[in-house]
């Protein structure tokens, strides 16, 4: 997406998810009680929801360009194939060099592999609100049932299993579809503020009524799914009001920049953290001071912001976003040549 066509509120929401992921992964170096665990809990669902929003907007842009359903699916499939393939490689490498962090090797599910699956299945659900809602509830209900029937099921195992995480992708599509198709309602900031307040109350009640423990497994329960999705809605609505409508973009510029290179930033920061953890282990430091956590967080955020600023001049050449964009176009052209279809 070109800079002039980007939606700042979505980039900022994506950037917030990246900051949460950085803090969550800092647990491999030094964690802060509460902050790191909460970041670990919310990071992946937030990122997956925003990915669903972005994918629905991507489909809408292709529809405006006049692409038919077959052409849209070809491009979605191309992006999914490239994203799945590229993100499988770090899992294999990580499983070999860091078996304690990547214990499941090739069978591991990363958040990007779940998103790649979402590109394919989400395409069939695009614009079908009731089907999306039904799919979300079926996935949430089916997850514990599958676990009871087969505790080693590939659908529900891994760091970010397809079930229940793909439900968050569908939730993002639902949010995006509602926004795109109800712009007349959403233009009124007072309506947006009221809607955000209702969601905040709904999320709070969901937390109070839930008796389920706060851990990674609970992200697949209906109570926490509603809570996480509602909080993400509040963040996005707030950004729509403050940034897209009231133009307070400078305040959130750091998140905006991180959101532009979110896919690449994920791997850049992860390599940095693993390298830091390895260096500290080689130095045999028995007690890592707590201040290392916020210090590393600020260093990583600053580094990524600088990288984005410099990289932008070169259209993010060789970044994951660039590979997805150019690779899907090349793969699509290759596919068209094989099946003999005419590319628009």
Image: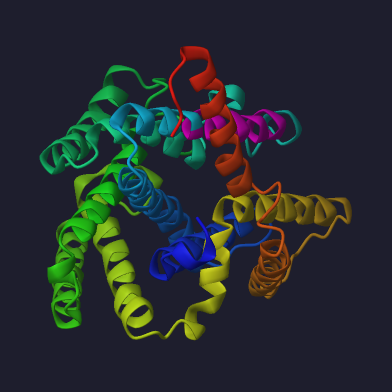
The residue sitting at 20% across, 81% down in the picture is: 189
The residue sitting at 48% across, 55% down in the picture is: 40
Res 3 seen here: yes
Locate residue 334, reporting x and y percent. 57, 22
Task: Assess whether residue 276 is covered by the magenta stretch.
Answer: no
The residue sitting at 52% across, 37% down in the picture is: 110
Q: How many marks?
A: 0
Task: Assess whether residue 85 is covered by the magenta stretch.
Answer: yes
Locate residue 183, reporting x and y percent. 18, 66
Relative placement, left or right, of 73 versus 202 is right
Relative placement, left or right, of 27 versus 131 is right
Name the foreground residue: 76 vs 166.
76
* 4 versus 79 height, above or below: below
Locate residue 17, reporting x and y percent. 47, 60
Tell me where the magenta segment starts and ends, as one range.
79-94
Name the foreground residue: 267 vs 177.
177
Q: Which residue lies furthest to the top in this view?
A: 339
């Amino acid at each position: 997406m070109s800079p002039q066509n980007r939606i700042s509120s979505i980039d900022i929401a994506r950037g917030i998810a990246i900051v949460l992921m950085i803090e969550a992964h800092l647990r491999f170096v030094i964690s802060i009680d509460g902050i790191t665990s909460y970041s670990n809990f919310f990071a992946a669902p937030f990122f997956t929801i925003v990915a669903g929003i972005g994918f629905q907007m991507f489909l809408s842009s292709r529809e405006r360009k006049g692409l038919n359903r077959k052409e849209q699916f070809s491009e979605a499939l191309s992006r999914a194939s490239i994203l799945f393939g590229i993100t499988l490689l770090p899992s294999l490498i990580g499983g070999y060099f860091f078996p304690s962090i990547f214990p499941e090797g090739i069978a591991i599910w990363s958040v990007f592999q779940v998103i790649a699956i979402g590109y394919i299945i989400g395409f069939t659900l695009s614009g079908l609100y009731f089907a999306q809602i039904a799919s979300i509830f079926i996935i949430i209900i089916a997850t514990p049932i599958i676990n009871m029937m087969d505790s080693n099921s590939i659908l529900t195992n891994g760091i970010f299993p397809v079930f229940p995480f793909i439900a968050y992708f569908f939730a993002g599509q639902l949010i995006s579809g509602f926004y795109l198709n109800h712009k007349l309602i959403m233009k009124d900031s007072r309506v947006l503020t009221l809607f955000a307040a209702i969601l905040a109350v709904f999320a709070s009640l969901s937390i109070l009524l839930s008796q389920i423990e706060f851990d990674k497994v609970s992200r697949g329960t209906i109570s926490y799914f509603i809570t996480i999705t509602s909080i993400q809605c509040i963040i996005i609505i707030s950004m729509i009001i403050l940034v897209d409508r009231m133009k307070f973009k400078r305040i959130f510029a750091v998140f905006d920049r991180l959101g532009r290179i979110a896919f690449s930033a994920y791997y850049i920061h992860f390599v940095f953290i693993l390298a830091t953890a390895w260096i500290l282990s080689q130095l045999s430091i028995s007690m890592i001071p707590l201040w290392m956590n916020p210090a590393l967080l600020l260093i990583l955020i600053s580094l990524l912001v600088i990288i984005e600023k410099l990289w932008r001049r070169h259209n993010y050449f060789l970044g994951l976003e660039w590979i997805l964009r150019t690779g899907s176009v090349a793969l699509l052209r290759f596919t068209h040549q094989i099946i003999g279809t005419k590319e628009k």
